Image (tube, rainbow, N blue to C red):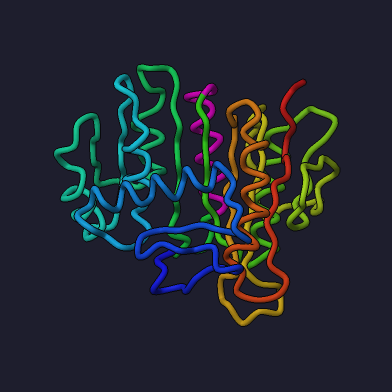
Amino acid sequence: FDREERGAPPGGADTGTGGTHAGANGADSTAIADTTAAANAAAADAAGIRFYPGSPALARLVLRPQDRMALCEKHPEEFAALRGRFGRARRVSVHGMDGYTAIRAMLPPPEKRALVLLDPPFEERGEFARITSALAEGLRRAPGATFAVWYPLTERAQANAFLNAIAAGCTAGGPTSGTAGGLAGSPTVCAPAFAAPAFTTPPFATPAFAAELTVAGADSPLRMRGCGVAVLNPPWRLDRVIAPMMRELAALLAQGDGGAGGLRWLAPEKP
């Protein structure tokens, strides 16, 4: 998001120099403005890093006095960098393991509440299946925890099957499940787009939504033209904050025609 790397956004709304900026036709949403302010603060805290600082730095900024954060990284070089950056930080621990191992090792937490962010590398086949199994294990151990999973949109069919597996697990025994047929501008609930996903998972019995952003259409030469985050057990009405952000970010970060942003429920919250 650095200005010198990506250029100014549409409408010339970016009038700053360096750091992380957001602007869409001169009108930032409060949530986007808060996020970019946090990113700049985290970058400044990291001795002048000019690029997006990463989720550990952002999460550390919002830790309350009663909170703690556990960071897990399996890759040796990345683990060393993470430990060098946060190894002495208060209320932060750094562990040389992947997130799948951490779910078994750290849940349930003594606080009985948790936010678990999974950011898999997607370097091996079967990553989506591992994620759904990990989510089932995590929710079995900590049914009140919130789980957020980042995923790439390199193959739409694979992402759809993954989201359908979550929808099927979340609504097992219920009357509805969420569609996974593509981006939507507003929440929807209907039958799954794929009758038989490529993998199965035990029931989750929890509400879940997926927020996705693409910067170009399906005919774009970009290898990864978008990504998404699936959230299970989301905080109440979080979707009302995220959905407008997705649409604004789609306009702000567009790299070609056909990009879009939206949120859809995979399993709805109970009224």
The residue sitting at 79% across, 54% down in the picture is 194
Q: Quadrant of residue 182?
A: bottom right
- Name the spot of residue 142 as percent of width and height, x first: 48, 24
* 174 vs 127: above or below: above
Count of number-bearing discs? 0
Magenta-tinted stretch:
128-144
* 79 vs 204: above or below: below
Viewer-closest of 129 and 64 = 64
Q: Is residue 136 magenta?
A: yes
- Name the spot of residue 24 as percent of width and height, x first: 60, 59
Residue 248 lies left or right of residue 114; in this view the side is right
- Name the spot of residue 124 as percent of width and height, x first: 46, 63
* 133 vs 27: above or below: above
Residue 214 lies left or right of residue 269; in this view the side is left
Q: Quadrant of residue 226?
A: bottom right
Q: Residue furthest bottom?
A: 221
Q: Is residue 120 magenta?
A: no
Viewer-closest of 200 and 80 = 80
Q: Main SS of the magenta segment? A: helix
Viewer-closest of 37 and 240 = 37
The residue sitting at 72% across, 40% down in the picture is 266
